[in-house]
């Protein structure tokens, strides 16, 4: 008897190997999505905890919301994409000018 693990995937056909790999990937994606949702909730709780004390803090909150909006179907219009990009760049530039 050996302590070495047996690689069972080698003994299955290609279709079974592919199905197993797809299941593993799906489980990983679901776990990552759950972790992302938990981190988003944590971030939003933090953002809601107190009003911004500086313009850069307010810009950070707006940046988060614009990023969420940018992923929505309503934001797919090229003009809106340009506006979002321009506003995010404005936030970055103005935050650097104020030392934030």
Image: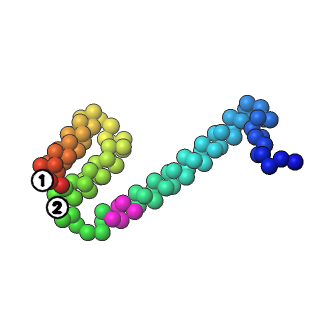
Q: Which residues are magenta?
A: 42-46
Any mark on residue 38, and which? none
Report the front residue among 40 and 77.
40
Q: Are marks 2 and 1 in contact (CB under 8 Å)?
A: yes
Q: Residue 23 at x, y = what percent?
A: 65, 43
Which numbered disc flags the more N-terminal residue, 2 or 1? 2
At which x and y percent is residue 87? 20, 44
Q: Residues within 10 Å of mark 2 (few under 14, many from 20)?
A: few
Q: Name the residue at 23% across, 44% down.
A: 88
Residue 98: numbered disc:
1
Question: Looking at the picture, how far across and down is residue 59, in whole percent?
Answer: 21, 54
For the stretch drawn in magenta, the main secondary structure is helix
User: Viewer-proximal residue, 35 or 82?
Assistant: 35
Q: Is residue 72 above or below residue 45?
A: above
Q: Is residue 40 magenta?
A: no
Quarter of the rendering occupied by the C terminus? bottom left
The structure residue drawn at horizontal position 21% and vertical position 58%, both measured from the top left corner, is: 58
Identity of the residue furthest to the bottom in this view: 50
Report which quarter residue 89 is drawn in: top left
Residue denoted by label 2: 54
Q: Quadrant of residue 81?
A: top left
């Amino acid at each position: 008897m050996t302590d070495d693990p047996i690689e069972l995937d080698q003994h299955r056909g290609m279709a079974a190997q592919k199905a197993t790999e797809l299941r593993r990937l799906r489980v990983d994606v679901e776990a990552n999505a759950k972790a992302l949702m938990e981190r988003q909730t944590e971030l939003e709780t933090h953002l809601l905890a107190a009003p911004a004390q500086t313009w850069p803090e307010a810009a950070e909150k707006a940046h988060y919301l614009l990023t969420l909006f940018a992923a929505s179907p309503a934001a797919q219009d090229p003009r809106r994409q340009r506006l979002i990009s321009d506003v995010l760049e404005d936030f970055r530039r103005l935050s650097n000018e104020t030392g934030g």
